[in-house]
Structure formats: C-alpha cells, structure tokens
Image (tube, rainbow, N blue to C red):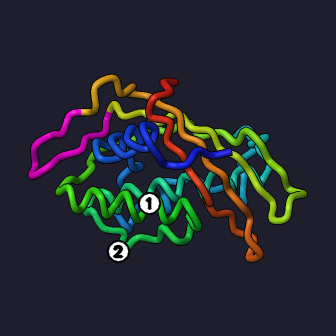
C-alpha cells in the first residue's frame, strides 16, 4: 500500500523533509501533553468521543511518531527521543535516515507542523491487527534553516500535502507506525 522511496518521488519526499517535514516540536516536559489522551473521567456536560479506543490508540502512535520526529529534526539527532516507542520497521529506518540526512546537510527544522490525521481503515482481525492513517500535513508554521538562515521550500511544494501510514498492534498491545509515506506532490 505504501510507495518505496525511489526516483522522482523519493527526491520530492527527501526535499520536503530537508525543507521542513517533521512534526510538532516539543520539549521532554510537554511531549505527553502534545497528544491528547482519553480521560478516565468525563464530565456530564462534555461530549463523549464516538471514536473507538483502538482508533484513538492508533492516532496516539502516529502523533507520537511525528512529535518525536520533530524533536529529532530540531537537533538534528534521534538521540534522546522516544521514536522507537512509536515507530518500527521501515518507518523507523526512514526517520533515522532522514535525520541523518538533515544533520549531514547542516539543516534543522523549527516551528509547528500542522496535522489532520484520520484512521481510514482498521483491520482488528488481521494478525497482527493493522490500521491505515491518512493525514494532511501543513507547513504554514514550519521552517527549515541552515546556519540560522531559512531554506526555501522546493518550487511547486504545496503548503499542505498528504501523508499515509501503516500502523500495527504488537503483542504488548501498543500500536506502532510501520511505514509512513509523505506524498509531497499531493496537495490537500
């Protein structure tokens, strides 16, 4: 379901990352607050969330990956992040490669990256259970710099573009992003 990083598509995705993809920046102290969690208590006046628990857990894993990626691209280093708590397999390899590429290019990402993730498919009966997340990433408040100087986005790069992810539930009950693909050429 995902596309491999090759040819022109890989160049677009890498260019997008080098010029600002990542996630919402967060400090260690506010990482937990950046991803809303379901409350054990609910007030009578608060509307109930119709989203099933599994979908909330899938979105928490996806948002956690982006949050930790944002921390990594600000340094740029994955050291000191909890990216392995949220991503594995190809997604984790992609994050590590992209952070290394930014470090080698001397770039850093700063600001806030907007998201509108939605679970578009759940297969709880699969072994392991799987889900697909579709997102619209917003670069409006995101910036990449080299030595403190802003690096412009590639020409034709939409300020809002599609991202998809495949997420799996592991034996420990936690969901992890296994693949994610940035469709930098697809405006949303």
Question: Helix, strand, or loop for circle 2?
Answer: loop
Is residue 148 covered in magenta?
yes
- Residue farthest to the front, as pictured: 7
Q: Looking at the image, is 119 positioned above or below residue 131?
A: above
Q: Viewed as shown, does residue 101 lie left or right of 149?
A: right
Does the stretch in magenta take in 53? no
Q: Nearer the viewer, residue 21 or 186?
A: 186
Q: Nearer the viewer, residue 184 or 121?
A: 184
8 vs 88, left or right, is left
Identify the disc placed on residue 150.
Answer: none
| 121 sits left or right of 98 in the view | right
The secondary structure making up most of the magenta span is strand
Few, some or many residues within 10 Å of mark 1 (<14, 14–19, 20+): many
Q: Residue furthest right?
A: 125
Residue range of the region highlighted in magenta in the rendering: 141-152
Q: Quadrant of residue 90?
A: bottom right
Residue tagged 2: 79
Assign the N terminus to one quadrant of the image: top right
Quarter of the image where one finds residue 80? bottom left
Counting from the top left corner in percent of width and height, residue 15 is at: 32, 41
Please identify, in this view, whether the residue under mark 1 or under mark 2 is nearer the observer: 1
Q: Which residue corresponds to the image point at 52% horizontal and 71% vertical from the top-left? A: 84
The residue positioned 59% from the left and 40% from the top of the image is 117
Place of residue 98 in the rendered image (x, y in percent of width and height, measured from the top left): 37, 57
Residue at numbered disc 1:
95
Circle 2 packing at 10 Å, graded few (<14), some (14-19), many (20+), is few
109 over 65 or under it: above or below? above
Which quadrant of the figure has residue 47? top right
The local secondary structure at tag 1 comes to helix
- Image coordinates of residue 125 in percent, x first then y, are 90, 57
């Amino acid at each position: 379901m995902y596309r491999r990083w090759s040819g022109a598509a890989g160049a677009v995705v890498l260019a997008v990352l080098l010029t600002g993809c990542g996630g919402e920046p967060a400090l260690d102290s506010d990482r937990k607050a950046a991803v809303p969690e379901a409350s054990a208590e609910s007030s009578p006046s608060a509307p109930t969330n119709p989203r099933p628990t599994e979908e909330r857990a899938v979105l928490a894993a996806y948002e956690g990956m982006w949050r930790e990626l944002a921390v990594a691209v600000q340094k740029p280093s994955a050291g000191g992040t909890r990216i392995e708590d949220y991503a594995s397999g190809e997604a984790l390899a992609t994050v590590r490669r992209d952070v290394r590429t930014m470090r080698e290019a001397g770039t850093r990402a700063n600001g806030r990256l907007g998201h509108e993730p939605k679970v578009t498919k759940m297969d709880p009966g699969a072994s392991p259970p799987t889900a697909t997340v579709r997102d619209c990433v917003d670069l409006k408040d995101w910036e990449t710099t080299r030595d403190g100087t802003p690096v412009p986005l590639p020409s034709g790069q939409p300020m809002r573009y599609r991202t998809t992810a495949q997420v799996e539930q592991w034996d420990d009950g936690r969901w992890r992003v296994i693949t994610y693909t940035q469709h930098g050429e697809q405006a949303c």
